[in-house]
Amino acid sequence: MSTTIPDALSTEGEAGSGQFGRQITKESVSQQAYVAIRNSLMRSRLKPGQKLVARQVADELGISVTPVRESLLRLASEHALMIDERGTVIVPVLTLERCIEIRDLRMLIEGEGAARAAALVTQPEIEKLLAIHDRYVRTEADRNFAVALAENENFHFGVCRLARSPTLFRVVENLWMQFGPILSYLYDAQARPFHGQKHGHLRVIEAFRKRDPELARKAISQDILIGGKTLLEKLKA
């Protein structure tokens, strides 16, 4: 959670506002650490099996150890991280069965999000999604895979935000925290998802242009299914 600068025309002299607005509390530092680690999980910066040492994470973030420990424990309670019998925090290595479970849940929940979004989306919002997809394709072609993964996340989260359902969005975020680290496997193989066929993102955009909820549901579900095929093949191997 970032600290925002109050608008220049806001009322001055409010009790406790101070020169820089409200103070940064211990809780807000912990929240910022949580968001930073969560984003690294979702965008595959952290890899399956990687150990997270609180002191090292704190040094990289430039904060004290306590809020980092709190964030790691919070993420472990959300099943995004695990703690072994020695108290070591580890990025989980998903089993094939767990991977399929999360994939299927994503298809259901993101499918529902896409269906709701299709009935609400505006033309400018569709164009923003198309711009995100174009950046994704361009960065993947340039083999800038870290940015491509981020743009892929931006597309999926953008679709879910258009559903205007904060509860649905939180569920999707939690699934991505668990699933994100293995997305790096997408770029271990020679073949790219959707090679030689229309990309799933474009099918979602087509459904939005038609304002067709069921077509949007099917499109995002197929995108998740086809996009995750490489991951399942690697886990099976």
Image (tube, rainbow, N blue to C red):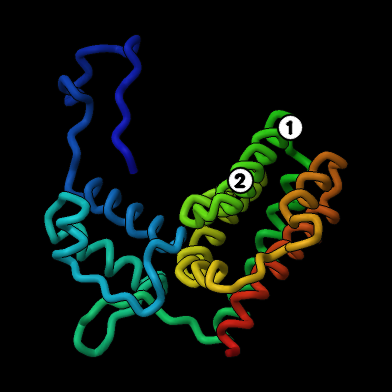
Q: In this view, does 171 lie to the left or right of 80?
A: right
- Whether residue 166 is visible: no
- The residue positioned 23% from the left and 80% from the top of the image is 88
Which residue is more in the foreground, 110 or 93?
93
The residue labelled by disc 2 is 138
Choose the circle earlier in sequence order: 2 or 1.
Answer: 1
Image location of residue 47, percent across then percent down: 39, 71
Q: Which amino acid does label 2 sit on?
A: Arg
Which residue is more in the foreground, 88 or 135?
135
Image location of residue 44, percent across then percent down: 44, 63
Q: Residue furthest top?
A: 9
Q: In this view, does 195 lie to the left or right of 186?
A: right
Q: How crowded is mark 1: few (under 14 residues within 10 Å), some or many (20 or more)?
A: some
Q: Are marks 2 and 1 in contact (CB under 8 Å)?
A: no
Q: Is mark 2 on a helix, strand or loop?
A: helix
| As drawn, 178 above or below 99 | above
Q: What residue type is labelled 1?
A: Thr
- In this view, the mark in front (2 or 1): 2
- The residue positioned 34% from the left and 9% from the top of the image is 9
Specify the quadrant that holds the C terminus. Answer: bottom right
Q: What element carries label 1?
A: loop
Image location of residue 59, percent across then percent down: 15, 56
Specify the quadrant that holds the N terminus. Answer: top left
The residue labelled by disc 1 is 122
- Whether residue 81 is visible: yes
